[in-house]
Image: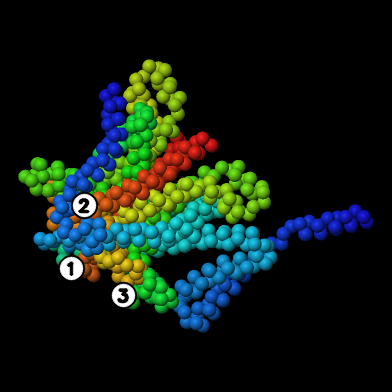
Amino acid sequence: MLFRGTATFAGSMVLIIIAAIAVFLVVKAIPAFQDDTENFFTFKEWFTDGDTPRFGIAATAFGTVLTAALALLIAVPVALGIALCLSHYAHRRVATTLSFIIDLLAAVPSVVFGLWGRDYFYEPVTNLSKWLHDTVGWLPIFGSEGPYGKSVLLGSIVLAIMILPIVTSLSREVFLQTPRENQEAALALGSTKWEMIRTAVIPYGKAGIIASVMLGLGRALGETIALALTLGSVFAINWDFLGPGGITIASNIANRFGEADEFGRSALIASGLVLFAITLVVNMAARAIVYRRREFVGSA
Amino acid sequence: MSVQTTERVGLQNAQQLRTKTLPTWSPWAVAAAALVVSFVLVYLTSWGGAVLTGVVAAVLFVLFLGIAATVVEGSRSARNRMATTLIYGAFLLALAPLISVAWTLISKGTTRLDGNFFGTSMNNIGAFDEKGGAYHAIIGTLEQAGIATLITVPLGILGAIYIVEYGRGFLANAIRFFVDVMTGIPSIVSGLFILSFWVFTVTPLFNNGQARYSGFAAALSLSVLMLPTVVRSTEEMLRLVPSALREGAYALGVARWKTIVSIVLPTAGPGIVTGVMLAVARAAGETAPVLLVAGGLSSINFNVFSGNQSSLSLYVFEQAGVASEFAPGRAWTAALTLVVLVLVLTVAAKLLARRNKLAR
């Protein structure tokens, strides 16, 4: 009975911790909410010093969603391509080795990607930005005159590279689960390999693909250090991808935390609470899809 | 004679039945054509350089291959060929950053790979000092990851035992669901949680009302990140233990808890170790929680319970922001050290998993 009780308590720790995260973030954020002289959700800038603190998460929340969405836009097609390559195209032994390498890529700490993005990848992206501006500069998103470099473009490409492994490995597993019968039936009806994948593999894995993309999204929304190093940290809401700019809730916390006083830290905790709520919703939705799917597979 | 005729007719019919296919060398020819056209197009219009030539050539390759296949083999086969090209293309595209990161790490990370780097801290190192190392950061990483492991492993394994062996009904389902949800909690949120809970609420109680940042707080927030990973992987391993083993023990009159401790856990042991090692590898690379609750320090501090501490990943982040010509060398060498540490753990865990009889 003692053992059982200990085990039950340890299991319940997960629930306790999630509840505690919500409670403590709310408690420590309350002073910030109370003393904020502007609307926390619609104000764009972040001044926590002085007698009349004015701060809001509008710009950071916008930046968080924008960079994550761009990263997904870049990463998802590539990740699905790699996943299909590993599950259906490459030779099995090659695929095993390459999946191993993709898993290693997932283990590389984010600060390393951030440093790489800032010190090395900066240059090709600057050139790309110049080229995009010269070629399709009439589009508002590429309209910036520069200086190029630390921009939404750089941040979201680095972020895309970071979420690539997780989306790849999850969707690869989904593709591998496609029943052999479905695939062979499609081939027996004379379909080409691509038609087989389009008609048998992808429809079967649809829920799994959506879930893996949403888990990638959750990862992208919460990424901190890589974006703190590669974004320009400008509090503004605009659609300029190339100029110095871009900020997210998490990168703002990492960049401001060192200089913030106690009240400033409370304000950062308040913004972290919003991030927690967003990622919690995204993750719960993704897991709910996976769970419904699991029951479906179980009954099939 | 008549037999020969029928044979010839049959052969002709067979050739008509079989669809025409492009010769095997055709992709190479198409690739060469695409490259030439792209070169002419890009350089004659002075539109860009070598990189653009490559990109345009890749696009033209897919386009030309599609056209050639449509003309000879039909549109379905053309789509098939284009899809195959794009899928392999996606793979090559993803290899580029991987190789670039690896190359940058090795070429830049070896600049400060010397005894001084691993033997000294950053204490009294100014912007014009060439020396200075990561000794204090390595100490911090090892201590924080070690304590986080000590906290997480018993908790995680017991939690998984509850889910697999005892858990029934609503509570078990809720725990399983939230373990998965917890995997997705951003590391910065975990850092903020320990900041508000441990640093701002608990430590003032026995520190004269002063908030105390420490390496232990960093270990706590790392264990929040590790817990769901450990529970999940242990749970999967426990489920693989054959129920015949459990039933055999029950039939001999062994108590349930003793069955779990002396039969189930040893059987699942290697798999559990693999999961723990992967979790440690991930936690050791985290920067944000350490930045928030351990604060960072340039001198050596062995005491995890009192005073700021640094860690390798935080050291990389700090050095990335230092305005000194020697800082990038230190940052990259520390990054290389961190990656080697994390990869050694990951590869060892994967090799252990491969030798695990239960999983195969």
**Residue A232 drawn above or below residue A175:** below
**Residue B218 drawn above or below residue B53:** above
The answer to whether B214 appears left or right of A207 in the picture is: left
Q: Quadrant of residue A73?
A: bottom left
Mark 1 is surrounded, within 10 Å at the Cα level, by few (under 14), some (14 to 19) or many (20 or more) other residues, namely few
Residue identifier under label 3: A147
CA gap between label 3 and label 1 equals: 27 Å
Residue identifier under label 2: A269
* Residue A210, position as x, y percentages in the image: 45, 50
User: What residue appears at the point 39 percent right and 52 percent down from the top-left corner?
Assistant: A216
Q: Is residue B246 visible?
A: yes
Regarding mark 3 in the picture, which secondary structure is present there? loop
CA gap between label 2 and label 1 equals: 33 Å
Identify the mark nearer the N-term, 3 or 2.
3
**Residue B296 drawn above or below residue B158:** below
Mark 3 chain:
A
User: What residue appears at the point 27 percent right and 43 percent down from the top-left corner?
Assistant: B224
Both labels 3 and 2 in a single chain: yes
* Residue B292, position as x, y percentages in the image: 21, 53
User: What residue appears at the point 85 percent right and 58 percent down from the top-left corner?
Assistant: B8
Regarding mark 1 in the picture, which secondary structure is present there? loop
Q: Nearer the viewer, residue B309 or A237?
A: A237
The answer to whether A242 appears left or right of B82 in the picture is: left
* Amino acid type at mark 2: Ile
* Amino acid type at mark 3: Pro
Residue identifier under label 1: B127
* Residue B296, position as x, y percentages in the image: 19, 55
